[in-house]
DNA sequence: TTTGTATTTAACTGCGCAGTTAATTAACTA
DNA sequence: TAGTTAATTAACTGCGCAGTTAAATACAAA
C-alpha cells in the first residue's frame, strides 16, 4: 500500500507536473493560479497535484485573504536524497571503470 | 501518463519492496527466488516488481540455465540523485538556519 | 448585498499498480 | 520420457491516480 513516508515522497516526485511545481517554488512562495499558469491543465487538476505534494510533505500552505500560497518544504526531499546517497559509490565506481576502459582503448590506439 | 524516464524511475522507487530489492542487489546478482525469500509475498508478485524495476532501468536481467539473475543498474539511480541535487542547497541552508537559531537560544540561556 | 476572484469539492471516466491463485513455459535431471 | 525446479503469464479483484466539467465555498471590493 506504500503508506510509508519515503514511498509517498517518491510517488509524489513521479510526475513531471509536480516536479516542475517544486522547481518553480525554489524561487519562493506562489499561489495556486500562479503555479497553474505554465500548464495546459485545469485548475482542479493543479489543486490535486498540490494536495499530493502536501500529503508528501514536499510543500506547505498558508492563507492570505483568498489565496493559499504554497511553499517548498525541504525535509522530504532530503530524505529522498539520503536514501539514494549510499548508492552513489556504486555509480561512481561504475563510471570510473568505464573511464579507465576508454583510456585503455585510447592508449592502445596510440600504439598502433 | 508519466511516460518520461525520470517519472518511471521515481515511481519504481515508490515501493518499499522494490527499494528493499535494490538494497539486496548491492551485494551482487540474485535470482528471483532469492530476492523473493525475505518477503511474505507470492512469486508472481515479486516477478511483477522486478518487471517494474527493469522497465525503470534500475535492474537488468540475464539468463543462466533456468535462472534469470538480476543485477543492479546504477544510471537511473544517478539520474534521480542528479534531479535532487540542486535542492541540496535549500535544505542545508534551512538546517544551518535552524542550527544558528538553536545556538542563539543557548547563548541567551547562558546569559541568564 | 451583489459581484468578482481564488480555490476546492463532487462526480465521473479511464488507466495502471499491487496483490491473489491457477496454468503455462523453460530448462535441468534421472 | 517423466518429473522437478525456476519463473512468467493469465485472469481476476480492488484501489487510487490523473484528468475532465460543473457546482460549491471563501474572501474582497464596490
Image (spheres, coloured by chain):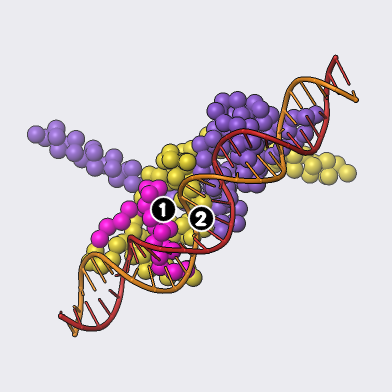
Chain colours: A purple, B yellow, C orange, D red
Query: Taking A6 as reference, is B42 above or below it?
Result: below
Query: Taking B72 as reference, is B108 above or below it?
Result: above
Residue drawn at (62%, 44%) of the image: A52
Residue A26 is covered by the magenta coloring = no
Residue B56 is covered by the magenta coloring = yes
Q: Position of residue B57 (x, y in %)?
A: 37, 48
Q: Residues within 10 Å of mark 2 (few under 14, many from 20)?
A: many
Q: Mark 2, chain letter?
A: B
Residue stretch in magenta: B41-63
Residue D23: name its quadrant. top right
Q: Mark 1, chain letter?
A: B
Inter-mark Cα distance, 1 to 2: 10 Å
Residue drawn at (55%, 28%) of the image: A39
Residue drawn at (49%, 60%) of the image: B17
Q: Which residue carries the number 1 mark?
A: B52
Q: Which type of secondary structure does the marked residue at label 1 adopt?
A: helix
**How many numbered discs?**
2
Q: Which residue carries the number 2 mark?
A: B15
Q: Are marks 1 and 2 in contact (CB under 8 Å)?
A: yes
* Badge 1 or badge 2: first in the primary sequence: 2
- Residue in front for this viewpoint, A108 or B8: B8
Query: Taking A106 as reference, is B54 above or below it?
Result: below
Amino acid at each position: 500500500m506504500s503508506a510509508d513516508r519515503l514511498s509517498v515522497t517518491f510517488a509524489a516526485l513521479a510526475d513531471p507536473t509536480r516536479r516542475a511545481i517544486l522547481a518553480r517554488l525554489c524561487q519562493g512562495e506562489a499561489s495556486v493560479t500562479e503555479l497553474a499558469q505554465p500548464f495546459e491543465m485545469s485548475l482542479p487538476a493543479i489543486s490535486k497535484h498540490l494536495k499530493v505534494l502536501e500529503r508528501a510533505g514536499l510543500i506547505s500552505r498558508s492563507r492570505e485573504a483568498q489565496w493559499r500560497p504554497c511553499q517548498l518544504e525541504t525535509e522530504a526531499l532530503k530524505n529522498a536524497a539520503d536514501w539514494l546517497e549510499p548508492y552513489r559509490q556504486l555509480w561512481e565506481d561504475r563510471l570510473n571503470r568505464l573511464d579507465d576502459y576508454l583510456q585503455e582503448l585510447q592508449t592502445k590506439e596510440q600504439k598502433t
